[in-house]
Amino acid sequence: MVSAEQTILVTGGAGFIGTHTVVQLLNDGFRVSIIDNLDNSVMEAVDRVRELVGPKLAHKLEFHLGDLRNKEDLEKLFSQTRFDAVIHFAGLKAVGESVADPFRYFDNNLIGTLNLYDVMRRHNCKKMVFSSSATVYGQPDKIPCVEDFKLVALNPYGRTKLFLEEIARDIQRAEPEWKIILLRYFNPIGAHESGKIGEDPKGIPNNLMPYIHQVAVGRLPALNVYGHDYPTKDGSAIRDYIHVMDLADGHIAALRKLLTTKDIGCVAYNLGTGRGTSVLEMVAAFEKASGKKIPIKLCPRRPGDATAVYASTEKAEKELGWKAKYGIEEMCRDQWKWASSNPWGYQSKP
Ligand SMILES: NC(=O)c1ccc[n+]([C@@H]2O[C@H](COP(=O)([O-])OP(=O)(O)OC[C@H]3O[C@@H](n4cnc5c(N)ncnc54)[C@H](O)[C@@H]3O)[C@@H](O)[C@H]2O)c1
Ligand SMILES: O=c1ccn([C@@H]2O[C@H](COP(=O)(O)OP(=O)(O)O[C@H]3O[C@H](CO)[C@H](O)[C@H](O)[C@H]3O)[C@@H](O)[C@H]2O)c(=O)[nH]1
């Protein structure tokens, strides 16, 4: 049974995907506690979530400043509140940074998650939704990517996701009462339609959409298009972009499955749209949505990038009853709403 009084712990809930998911959880009647160390986020994002859902629902949200690497932070939280399930977003996610400093990635993503499992089992909370990534498919031989493809890691960040998937399977095998859903996100972009919350990366963005966003508002001069000689229709690489609100709803669908279905074990689902869009198509769609010209520079391929990656969405549709609603047009519209009303993200212009 899913009841309005169920309480969900959201680790990393102040971040990009976390804030959007917390809004949907509160709108759905759940109580939510966030734990976040604000390493890649700001308190203002949580304040905006409160503002968005209104004072009545905002009462059902608690924020705890804490770090998953400190078991005491988790222990304190679990001894105060009985959680029905955990949605685990907290983690570092920059591929390049993980290559330069793998220790930081293993320490944060692996140790943080092991601590979380340990405290959860000691408090008998054994339901978890975990943020995995399409990065576990590496450079797939075939597309669309199907959940039972062989998994590989191409960099230390990807290795943390792959290890954490394997760890989840081992934990569930050893203690079958665990229910764990691994969600493999494709490329989340866009923002809440209000334009009040969105992605706000620190430093120069690594990912395509935040980079385009910063060019559009004049923070960066031009977009480097990495690769124009791929064997695709326009020579640029293809990805499966998914609206962050669709992704948030995918978490609610996974959570409902955890809370209502027996013996689900440890199971992975792709969260994507099943449609591929090239970098140049994305630039054109953003220009149309924003009315801004995005100057581009054609550059060599980025090392490690795959030609084309997109999801098979069949399993999530069938077993979670979830399907992405939005297309590229809405993703760019909402990204632009966020960009144009918050050109410097949550901060004012430095
Ligand atoms: N955004 C993407 O493109 C993408 C794609 C696939 C998977 N993911 C995964 O989804 C999750 C959420 O991604 P996001 O885009 O919202 O990232 P984000 O950086 O915006 O959010 C992650 C949040 O976790 C917090 N955090 C990190 N380490 C922590 C720790 N040790 N203790 C407490 N809090 C900690 C950060 O401060 C941040 O608020 C991550 O695990 C990421 O690897 C993201
Ligand atoms: O400034 C940029 C940034 C990106 N790109 C291109 O845009 C496409 C998408 O790149 P992103 O960096 O936005 O996304 P990736 O697909 O490379 O990877 C992201 O999504 C993956 C899931 O599919 C993993 O989660 C990974 O960790 C995460 O960074 C790629 O062809 C890339 O070369 C550019 O041309 N210019």
Image: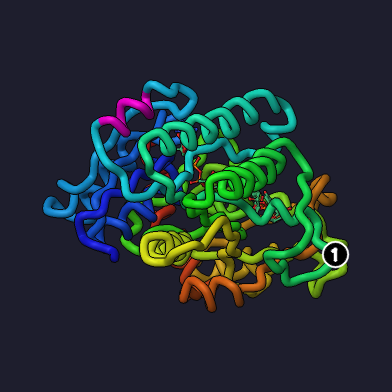
Residue lying farthest to the left in this orientation? 56
Look at the image and tell me whether residue 279 can be seen: yes
Residue 96 vertical placement versus 242 (above, below):
above
Q: Is residue 155 magenta?
A: no
Q: In the displayed structure, does residue 342 sit left or right of residue 5? A: right
Q: Residue at x 77, y 65 (%)?
A: 308
Q: Residue at x 28, y 47 (%)?
A: 32
What crowding class fits label 1: few (fewer than 14 Cα within 10 Å), some (14-19), or many (20 or more)?
A: few
Q: Quadrant of the N terminus?
A: bottom left
How many marks on residues? 1
Question: Residue 26 or 75: which is nearer the viewer?
Answer: 75
The picture places residue 11, in percent across and down from the top left corner, at 41, 40
Residue annotated with mark 1: 141
Q: Secondary structure at mark 1?
A: loop
The picture places residue 152, in percent across and down from the top left corner, at 78, 49
Please give the range of residues in magenta.
73-79
Look at the image and tell me whether residue 334 can be seen: no
Q: In the displayed structure, does residue 264 sit left or right of residue 107? A: left
Residue 209 vertical placement versus 309 (above, below):
above
The picture places residue 220, in percent across and down from the top left corner, at 58, 43
Q: Residue at x 60, y 60 (%)?
A: 268
Q: In the displayed structure, does residue 67 sit left or right of residue 9? A: right
* Secondary structure mostly seen in the magenta stretch: helix
Q: Quadrant of the C terminus?
A: top left
Residue 255 vertical placement versus 217 (above, below):
below
Q: Amino acid at mark 1?
A: Asp
